[in-house]
Amino acid sequence: MSIVGLSPWHYSFEPKLEGYEESLKLVLNEKKVIEENGLKAKAFFGFHPADVDKLMGLEGMTPEKVLELGLKVIDMIEKYIKAGLLDGIGEVGRQHYKTTPVNMVISELIMERALEVAKDYDVPVHLHLEQGGRVTAIDVKKRIERLGLDWRKIIVHHARGKSLEAAVEEGLRATVPGVTGSLERAAKLKPTYMVESDHIDDPKRPGTVVYPWEMVKNQLSLLERGLVDEEYLAKLNIDNVVETFGVEPP
């Protein structure tokens, strides 16, 4: 199970560096609980592009201060990765909704720094991006080539429709939400992607995006209807996971 931390205000922590570290520690504790219950887990933490917009709305937070905080969070993440406590970075990336040009630039600078850290420590990164189809895929591919990253560890998170199709065709690793419609469309592609639940475990938004166990049922439905075979699902759920996250199958 790959778990990704939420921003500090989701846990009632202050929107400053100390709050981000407290949030990160919660993720590490949850990883411990998961492993104590017999599952293998990988913990991720990042600086979500939506954080940029949130912080820019706070009194006294100039673009320079938001960028400074974001880069400090990435430095903190690097410290935990170096210590062997954190397994990857995420989410980082760009907003998938309308925002200001300066907010987009801040988000890209933070993402770029995160990718540099990923290169240094050979860890996976969850990228939160717009659904830009071929344009988004080309951008990610060029960043991978320029920085010399392992394409299997740069994950285009929550890719759907044409965006997933373009990611697969451009030789990128991506994840598709495990909901029926998205899975049916994805089943027509080469099995180089993975399936994710993107479940936020928020009582106010139950089932968002999909419960992990429902994600499994939805994939089995594809198998029962003859849209995929067992080898295809094994590639998505075993081979690609092993390559990306460095785990051994049970």
Image: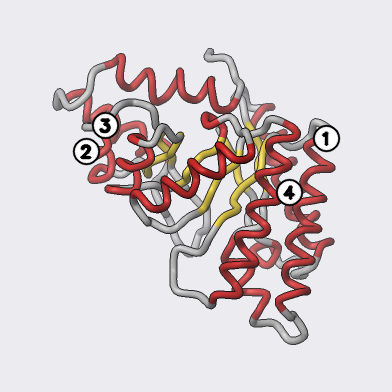
Instruction: Give the foreground label among 3 and 4.
Output: 3
Circle 1 sits on which residue? 82
The total of numbered circles placed on residues is: 4
Residue tagged 2: 184
| Residue 42 visible in the shown view | yes
Amino acid type for the residue under numbered disc 3: Leu
Which residue lies at the image location 45% right of the left edge and 61% below the top edge? Answer: 205
**Residue at point 17%, 27% (across, down):** 227
* Above or below: residue 78 compared with residue 9: above
Q: Secondary structure at mark 3?
A: loop
- Residue at left offset 75%, top offset 34%: 120
- Do callouts 2 and 4 mark residues in contact (Cβ within 8 Å)? no
Amino acid carrying label 2: it is Glu
Compare marks 3 and 2 and give the one earlier in the sequence: 2
Q: Position of residue 190 (x, y in %)?
A: 30, 27
Report which residue position mark 3 lands on. 189
Residue 183 x, y percent position in the rendering? 27, 38
